[in-house]
Amino acid sequence: MLICNKYINILIINGPNINFLKKRELIYSKVSFKKIKKKILNYSKSILNIKFYNSNCEGKIINFIQKNLNYDFLIINPGAYTHYSISLLDCLKIFNGKIIELHISNIYNREFYRKNSLISLNSNVIISGMGEKGYFSAINYILSI
């Protein structure tokens, strides 16, 4: 699918500890993010321009978003920043495209402190609890609009 005769440009940003998928509790994933990334690229390589970014540092994530404000979509798994990062929420308010908030686990069926998402206040779509398939659901959503 093309938007205005150009590829759809997507940022996929992962916050803290997503780089440790497969090494963390099984509630998150049995598969490393490196393998998930490879599957995403194989799935969408001919129709989407995807830029990946992962950081355990809140400020680096914010800097990256600020440098890429004009992407069509942002799929963000903010990790623990979901629940308390006002600075990330403020940064997302200036992003020009649509924002898809993604969580591998179901944050609404977890500990009480994980049920609240500040990021949801500025998200267009929320995907939670689908495991690694959530990334593909986000891409399929993008392709459907």
Image: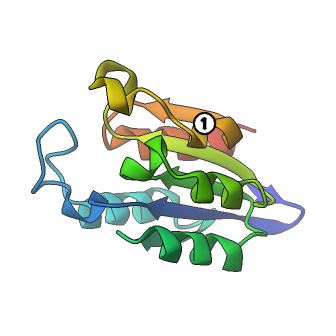
Image coordinates for residue 46, horizontal then vertical, percent: 58, 66
Q: How many marks?
A: 1
Q: Quadrant of the rendered structure where residue 41 is?
A: bottom left
Residue at (31, 57) in percent of width and height: 36
Q: Residue furthest top?
A: 109
- In the rendered image, the quadrant that contains the C terminus is top right
Eyeballing the image, is 73 above or below 50? above
Horizontal side of residue 45 vs 93, given as left or right: left
Observer-nearest of 70 and 85: 85
Provide the secondary structure element on which disc 1 rests. Answer: helix
Residue that appears at 62% across and 38% down: 141
Q: Which residue is mark 1?
A: 120
Q: Foreground residue, 77 or 131?
A: 77
Q: Position of residue 45 (x, y in %)?
A: 52, 67
Name the residue: 32% across, 23% down: 112
Horizontal arrangement in the rendering, residue 60 relative to residue 11 (left or right): left
What kind of residue is marked 1?
Ser
